[in-house]
Image (cartoon, rainbow, N blue to C red):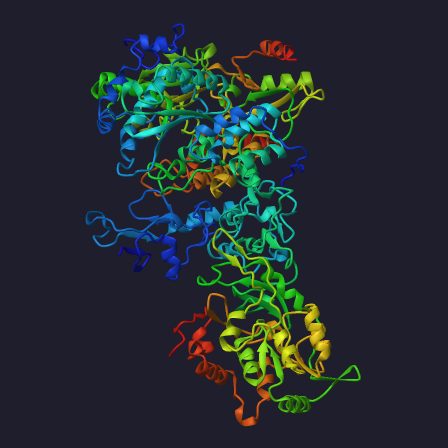
């Protein structure tokens, strides 16, 4: 393997690694804008210039490949390449490039959304001049919408071309292009073909400065006010890894988190903006019991008692409706509790979309159908028919996704029920049809594990705190058991789940970490 | 001195010199016949031996460039004739295309054969419409006479030649910019590696050669590498087409051996300066070279080495003469504006720097210069393209040599005529 | 956002044979882009939104990529021009040989500044960069033709002769 010396560090690298990759992997800070690991190398920003011994010109480290050289060409008889990233020449050149980049850049930091997470700010602070010597008129252009979700501030754009490359290489939709040339260059989209594909939100992420902004987030908050939690998107069975940014009880935005085994570096707009539908819901925060058509609050003890009576009395003439929108632990608990039959509501399918880069949006818009089937193998195919055949009149339902319409068949079934328990987080149509409502958690409050359609188990971490008296869904189901049969905590639950389903054995949150693990044995201790 | 007998432009004053019958009557396509009986490698060797260096501006050894084409690759190879002549001060390729297109074509076929290419392109700048029409006729003549197409001269070598028009972009004269343009995209030069000889047009091995370079090939084949080396300077030999324009009595293209003195070129061949005005400054190699003062110009030979020693370059051999009536600051602005207009905009120093130079120079010319401006002009040009000092690692800041092409001339104007810049600025101070 | 008007009528090449011939010359479709654009501009006078759509279909790429290409080259116009494009070279050799006077002549006589078109759409005046004929400076290109070594008088005669 070639031996590379960067500054004082001597490292062995794989043949064909670039100097920039080697530096970043080893904690050496070479600044860059146009480079992105998912995109083609263009070497146009010139920010990553370094000095390579033996080459008269400075080289862009993003396009300088390290390979073995014959012994007589090794530097000091030892190294295949020697690179300086911190000497006077390189530092001076960085300052110069930054000065050029900032020539037309407005002093917008106080009003720019990117402030606090801006590469230009970071590098200016680390490498730049304190003053600009540009004394001419700046080039000023008005902002423009490139699509319904993305607005561009041309004055901040440094023409790194990440966005145009993204639309060509990743989404394959090519809406963005560079208009004109030289100093007049600017990013544009055709008026009748705006940037409206489902991966559009990613261009605002990859823009290193505050030029491309998400209209959803613009001017709403500042990165330093927000806290971040890693979690998993719940809007389809791909399970893209995300970072959720929130302040107190409100989520402000979701960004993709890197996972090379799931979503690469990106996420789709369905998941990205989907969190909005959980805002401003009429939440259910206490157990509710319906009598004479009106819901009134009852205590948890009373609720559990009522459920116990009805379900024990009906023996096996009970049904449970699981949900692919709930975690493995929740489904597992309900599956075990129901002595009768278990099944699901009709599954809703939507468009399956695969992009040229391989990024996929699944047709299954629920996050955990695979996991649900894994930990509840006795799910029946047609729950509605079985309920009718067996004349079941007692049912326990996990509220599915958000307020969906109930179809004809199920409407009829529900009207015939003697006792409906719905575990819900909001007063949905389904909740309204219940006799007893137990307050569960909303999707961004839930914690547990979910399994994507490729068989990868991931840690769904809660982002927001519980609301009122709402409890984690598995915990509610836990209460339905006799005291001696309950799990003491979720870890015990997972152990129990693993004992029954070998592919899930040995699973802990710690093991799953923030990248998850594939099934098929890797979870075994 | 004995007048040099022209090689490339020997027949350009004769009637119908552009036609095939004429060209054949003066020995045209004999070299091609000879080449088809040689091994391609032998052709490359001969051209390497001759020390023929590219006439487009970069001056790279043609034979060595051809040698980079991988022999073991089964990808198609491409030869591209760079007829995108756009360097200010340069107009020799246009002459060759108008007067001896078959000479250029014969060279193209020879080069294509040497690198095992079966489809070659002529990338001609869009503005050369008349030349484009003529080349279409030239190709038709060649196809008719089986000098192109299948089985040339009865051999088993096939070659198709396609003319591709550019559309007004100087940067498409840069080889990777040209390749991008040929591929139907904007002419943004590519980073290297990969090099065009390995991954060029459509990711296939590609060689880009200048019109004049190709025109030399039939003569090298006919008379041999040694003959070629005997003309002019040894390290960069051969007949060269020097263009002289600007403030001269007799502007035009002059074919001379490499190494002719610039003084002779200007005052003898080009008839000197109108009204006997004084020489002030000269671009020796197109506008991308550093200017020479009159003193330097009168003391230099037109070849690769001597001009590098004088901290300039031979480039495209486009000599632009500026006499005492030419205002150096205005000339500097003129050139800077050219580069700002032609900058492709891809990389930071060039895109922002060229515009900055134009804004600053415009301000100075309009009487709003500031004392700091001189130092800033030095700084900006250094930051875009660095200095002509190969010992320091201070250039290579841009993807392609455009950065150096704007930095060197602009800096040389300021350096060598600093007093003129200062006087513009001092006028401001006097008024203030 | 690019300000091309939404295309009304589909653009069709008047000479499909020429289009076929162009495609037959290149190993891939995309390379035909510039040649097709030249052909379209010769037919329409400029590159409209419908030209872009048609060419994008033919070379099988997104119209934005064709627009990316068009906007880069100074010979492609996205707006209609005058019947005669008066392109005066302004680079050094022409500049020191009277190019400015030629520009001023047009401005004074026809009241248009560089970049503008006469009301009757007869002339568009443009200042362009080096046309590659510095030896015969000053040089003006009118549409496809070079006019070299012009004096003000000859230039005037030339302009008068253009319909």
Residue at x 57% of width, y 90% of height: A481
Q: Is residue B419 visible in the rendered structure shown here?
A: yes
The picture places residue C112, in percent across and down from the top left corner, at 67, 22
User: Image height check: is B71 above or below A494?
Assistant: above
Label tally: 0
The part of the image, by quadrant, that contains residue B124 is: top left
Q: Can you give x and y, in whole percent of width and height, for residue B19 in the image?
A: 39, 10
Residue at far front of view = A389
Does A142 appear above or below B251? below
Residue A410: percent from left, percent from top: 68, 72
Relative depth, front residue between A125 and A211: A211
Q: Nearer the viewer, residue B33 or A312?
A: A312
Q: Is residue B286 visible?
A: no
Residue A412 appears left or right of C27: right
Please name whichever residue, A273 or C162, is drawn nearer the observer in this view of the structure: A273
Outermost top residue: B15
Query: On the image, which quarter does residue B162 sit in?
Result: top left
Name the quadrant of the C terminus of chain A. Answer: bottom left
Q: Residue A252's x, y, as percent?
A: 62, 65
Q: Nearer the viewer, residue A316 or A279?
A: A316
The N terminus of chain A sits in image quarter: bottom left
Q: As drawn, which residue projects farthest toward the bottom?
A: A484
């Amino acid at each position: 393997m070639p031996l590379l010396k960067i500054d004082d560090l001597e490292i062995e690298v794989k043949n064909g690694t670039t100097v920039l990759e080697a530096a970043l992997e080893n904690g050496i800070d070479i600044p860059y804008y146009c480079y992105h690991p998912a995109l083609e190398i263009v070497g146009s920003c010139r920010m990553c210039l370094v000095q390579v011994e033996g080459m008269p010109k400075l080289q862009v480290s993003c396009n300088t490949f390290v390979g073995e050289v014959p012994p007589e060409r090794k530097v000091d008889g030892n190294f295949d390449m020697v690179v300086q990233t911190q000497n006077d020449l390189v530092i001076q050149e960085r300052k110069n490039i930054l000065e050029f980049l900032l020539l037309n850049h407005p002093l917008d930091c106080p009003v720019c959304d990117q402030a606090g997470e801006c590469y230009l700010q970071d590098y200016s602070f680390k490498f730049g001049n304190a003053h600009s010597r540009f004394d001419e008129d700046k080039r000023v252009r008005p902002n423009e919408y490139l699509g319904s979700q993305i607005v561009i501030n041309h004055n901040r754009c440094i023409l790194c071309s990440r966005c145009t490359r993204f639309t060509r290489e990743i989404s394959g939709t090519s809406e963005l292009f560079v208009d004109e040339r030289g100093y007049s260059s600017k990013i544009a989209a055709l008026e009748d073909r705006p940037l409206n594909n489902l991966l559009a939100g990613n261009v605002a992420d990859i823009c290193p400065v505050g030029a491309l902004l998400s209209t959803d987030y613009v001017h709403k908050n500042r990165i330093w006010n927000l806290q971040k939690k890693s979690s998993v998107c719940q809007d389809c069975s791909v399970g893209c890894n995300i970072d959720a940014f929130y302040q107190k009880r409100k989520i402000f935005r979701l960004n993709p988190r890197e996972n090379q085994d799931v979503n690469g570096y990106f996420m789709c707009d369905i998941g990205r903006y989907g969190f909005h539908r959980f805002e401003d819901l009429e939440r259910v925060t206490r157990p509710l019991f319906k009598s004479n058509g009106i819901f009134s609050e009852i205590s948890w003890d009373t609720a559990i008692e009522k459920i116990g009576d009805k379900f024990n009395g009906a023996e096996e003439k009970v049904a449970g409706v699981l949900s692919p929108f709930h975690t493995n632990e929740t489904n597992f608990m309900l599956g075990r509790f129901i002595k009768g039959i278990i099944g699901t509501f009709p599954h809703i399918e939507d468009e399956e979309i695969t992009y040229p880069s391989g990024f996929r949006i699944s047709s299954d818009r629920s996050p955990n159908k695979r996991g649900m089937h894994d930990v509840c193998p006795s799910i029946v195919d047609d729950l509605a028919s079985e309920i009718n055949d067996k004349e079941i009149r007692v049912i326990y339902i996990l509220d599915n996704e958000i307020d969906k319409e109930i179809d004809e068949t199920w409407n009829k079934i529900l009207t015939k029920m003697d006792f409906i328990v719905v575990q819900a987080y909001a007063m949905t149509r389904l909740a309204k049809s219940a006799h007893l409502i137990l307050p569960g958690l909303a999707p961004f409050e839930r914690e547990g594990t979910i399994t994507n359609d490729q068989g990868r188990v991931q840690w769904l971490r809660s982002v927001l705190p519980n609301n009122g008296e709402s409890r984690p869904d598995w915990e509610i189901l836990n209460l339905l058991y006799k005291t001696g049969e309950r799990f003491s905590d979720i870890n015990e639950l997972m152990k129990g789940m693993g004992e029954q389903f070998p592919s899930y054995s040995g699973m802990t949150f710690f093991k799953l970490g923030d990248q998850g693990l594939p099934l098929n044995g890797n979870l075994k201790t | 001195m004995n007048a040099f007998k022209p090689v490339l432009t020997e027949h350009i004053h004769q009637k119908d010199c552009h036609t095939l019958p004429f060209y054949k009557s003066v020995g045209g396509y004999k070299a091609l016949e000879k080449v088809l009986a040689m091994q391609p490698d032998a052709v490359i060797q001969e051209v390497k031996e001759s020390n023929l260096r590219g006439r487009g501006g970069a001056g790279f050894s043609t034979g060595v460039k051809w040698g980079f084409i991988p022999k073991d690759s089964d990808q198609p190879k491409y030869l591209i004739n760079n007829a995108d002549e756009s360097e200010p001060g340069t107009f020799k390729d246009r002459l060759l295309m108008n007067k001896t297109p078959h000479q250029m074509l014969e060279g193209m076929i020879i080069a294509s054969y040497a690198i095992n290419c079966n489809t070659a392109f002529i990338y001609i700048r869009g503005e050369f419409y008349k030349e484009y029409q003529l080349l279409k006729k030239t190709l038709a003549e060649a196809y008719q006479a089986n000098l192109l197409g299948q089985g040339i001269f009865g051999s088993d070598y096939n070659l198709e030649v396609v003319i591709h028009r550019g559309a007004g972009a100087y940067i498409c004269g840069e080889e990777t910019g040209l390749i991008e343009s040929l591929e139907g995209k904007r002419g943004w030069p590519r980073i290297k590696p990969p090099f065009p000889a390995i991954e060029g047009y459509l990711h296939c091995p590609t060689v880009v050669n200048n019109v004049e370079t190709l025109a030399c090939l039939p003569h090298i084949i006919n008379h041999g590498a040694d003959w070629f080396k005997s003309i002019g300077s040894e390290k960069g030999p051969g007949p060269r087409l020097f263009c002289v324009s600007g403030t001269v009595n007799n502007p035009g293209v002059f074919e001379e051996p490499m190494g002719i003195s610039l003084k002779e070129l200007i005052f003898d061949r080009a008839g000197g300066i109108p009204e006997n005005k004084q020489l002030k400054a000269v671009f020796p190699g197109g506008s991308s070279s550093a200017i020479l003062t009159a003193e330097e110009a009168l003391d230099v030979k037109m070849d690769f080495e001597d001009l590098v020693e004088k901290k300039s370059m031979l480039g495209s051999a486009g000599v632009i003469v500026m006499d005492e009536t030419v205002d150096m600051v205005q000339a500097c602005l003129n050139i800077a504006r050219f580069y700002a207009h032609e900058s492709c905009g891809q990389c930071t120093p060039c895109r922002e720097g060229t515009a900055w130079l134009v804004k600053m120079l415009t301000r100075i010319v309009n009487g709003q210069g500031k004392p700091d401006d001189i130092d800033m002009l030095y700084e900006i040009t250094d930051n875009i393209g660095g200095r002509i000092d190969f010992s320091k690692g201070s250039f290579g800041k841009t993807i392609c040599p455009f950065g150096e092409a704007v930095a060197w001339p602009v800096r040389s104007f300021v350096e060598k005529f600093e007093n003129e810049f200062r006087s513009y600025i001092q006028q401001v101070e006097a008024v203030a | 956002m690019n300000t091309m008007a939404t295309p009304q009528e589909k653009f069709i090449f008047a000479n499909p044979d020429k289009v076929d011939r162009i495609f037959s010359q290149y190993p891939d479709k995309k390379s035909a882009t510039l040649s097709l654009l030249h052909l379209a501009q010769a037919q329409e006078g400029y590159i409209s939104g419908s030209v872009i759509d048609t060419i994008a279909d033919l070379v099988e790429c997104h119209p934005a990529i064709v627009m990316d290409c068009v906007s880069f080259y100074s010979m492609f116009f996205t707006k209609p021009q005058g019947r005669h494009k008066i392109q005066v070279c302004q680079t050094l050799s022409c500049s020191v040989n009277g190019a400015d006077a030629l520009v001023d002549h047009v401005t004074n006589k026809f009241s248009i500044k560089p970049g503008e078109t006469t009301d009757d759409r007869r002339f568009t005046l443009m200042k362009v960069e080096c046309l590659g004929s510095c030896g015969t400076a000053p040089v003006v290109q009118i549409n496809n033709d070079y006019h070299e070594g012009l004096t003000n008088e000859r230039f005037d005669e030339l302009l008068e002769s253009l319909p």
